[in-house]
Image (cartoon, grey):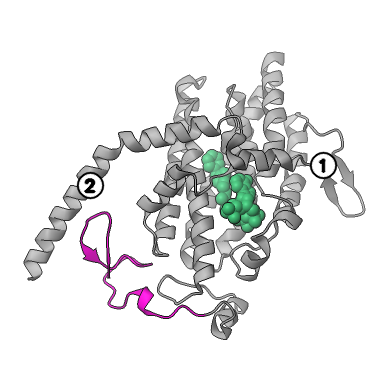
Amino acid sequence: MTLCRRCAIRCNIERVYGNDFTAPSQVDAPAEDDPGFLALLDDEGRVEPRDAMPEAYRKTLVRQIAQHAHSEIIGMQPEGNWITRAPSLKRKAILMAKVQDEAGHGLYLYAAAETLGVERADLLDRLHAGTQKYSSIFNYPTITWADMGAIGWLVDGAAIVNQVPITRCSYGPYARAMVRICKEESFHQRQGFEILHTLSNGTPAQHAMAQDAVNRWWWPSLMMFGPPDDASPNSERSMRWGIKRHSNDALRQKFVDMTVPQSHALGLTLPDPELAYDEASGHWRTGPIDFTELFEVIKGNGPCNVQRMAHRRGAHERGAWVRDAADAYAAKRAARTEAAVA
Ligand code: FAQ
């Protein structure tokens, strides 16, 4: 039993919610090459919170799920910027619902991470301290209304391509969270496409605005998939463990193949003079991607990194009274329950 930071009482907060009698830390974690664990993965079985799992597997999941959760909540900022300036009441209502969905995705993902024996409060501390990451894409500014279309079409589009395979992740809670998230992301992608379609077929100024947004978001969207395979230290092991199902480059290619025909339907061009269809392989091939930009953004040197983190830390500080009230309420209820069973 460990001390729960939230309600400050002794309870089992390890890897699972509920009334557990054996804390998972009392079960020996198997080795990475444990035959039973590898056989489960080979059979496409699911690892569940109460199952013993190799420590490195657990840590990899915490890292990826936390980074994913942080991305969802930081990702609310670029679009939140446009809620008050959406061009109509209908657009405003849709955008508000979308931003709210992202908060929900963060919640499902933090909850999934908590089943691995970490607390949401600690994960947020790590985000604020800069020891955990969030997606590079949310460090770019949203300058015009067309950016809402480009984010929906390209960023949510890339997120779907990346995340649909995670519905088959070997860790049950992450896989199940992703099923619902992907359904919502599909709606987000369509609403982005529809915004751009309307602008592209509008006045010349609106068309130019849509084209400008696509020009700015195309390359950062390709970088969302991570570094190229030969510079991706985590991919091989995560794929062996069934956490990732495809390599970064394979997913990036799938996104390009899906998106190029959509750009034709939109009447917009993608800002890559070398983009060409390769008959032999049946794939659209891009020009070289400038991954130094990705590494710089990950290091904190993107256009909005400082602003995003300052806003997040400020929001967290301003929300302290809500957490204090929830903690006081939880402690009061826990004390009452303890008194009742004593
Ligand atoms: N940004 O070895 P790999 C969304 C880091 S949600 C920042 O290839 P891995 C929805 C990586 O963490 C978007 N860091 O790593 C939405 C690692 O560093 P570490 C988020 C990146 O984990 C839409 C290092 O580089 N989606 O958009 C990035 O095997 C609209 C080496 O890389 C997910 O998180 C990057 N782009 O593969 C919300 C999906 N790429 O941790 C609001 C789940 C790499 O060792 C509005 N995550 N790094 O210190 C994944 O699929 C994987 O974690 C990857 C990275 C593919 C992102």
- Rendering coords of residue 65 (x, y %): 50, 56
Query: Residues under labels 1 and 2: Cα distance?
Result: 50 Å
Query: Around disc 1, counting alpha carbons within 10 Å, would you say few (fewer than 14), some (14 to 19), or many (20 or more)?
Result: few
Q: Name the quadrant of the C terminus.
A: bottom left
Name the residue rendered at 57%, 34% in the picture. Answer: 139
Identity, as a three-letter code, of the amino acid under mark 1:
Pro
Mark 2 element type = helix
Q: Quadrant of residue 22?
A: bottom left
Amino acid on which the number 2 mark rests in the picture: Ala
Judging depth in this view, the residue of 137 and 296 nearest the camera is 296
Of residues 151 and 287, the one nearer the viewer is 287
Percent across and percent down for residue 58 are 49, 67
Which quadrant does the N terminus fall into? Answer: bottom left
Q: Quadrant of residue 109?
A: bottom left
Q: Which residue is mark 1?
A: 288
Residue range in magenta is 1-30
In the picture, the disc for residue 311 is: none
Query: Around disc 2, counting alpha carbons within 10 Å, would you say few (fewer than 14), some (14 to 19), or many (20 or more)?
Result: some
Q: Which mark is residue 326?
A: 2
4 within the magenta span: yes
Name the N-terminal-most of marks 1 and 2: 1
Instruction: Answer left or right for 291 relative to 114.
Output: right
Kindly state the secondary structure of the residue where label 1 is placed: loop
Residue 197 magenta: no
Residue 264 image point, x, y percent: 78, 34
Q: Is residue 105 left or right of residue 202?
A: left
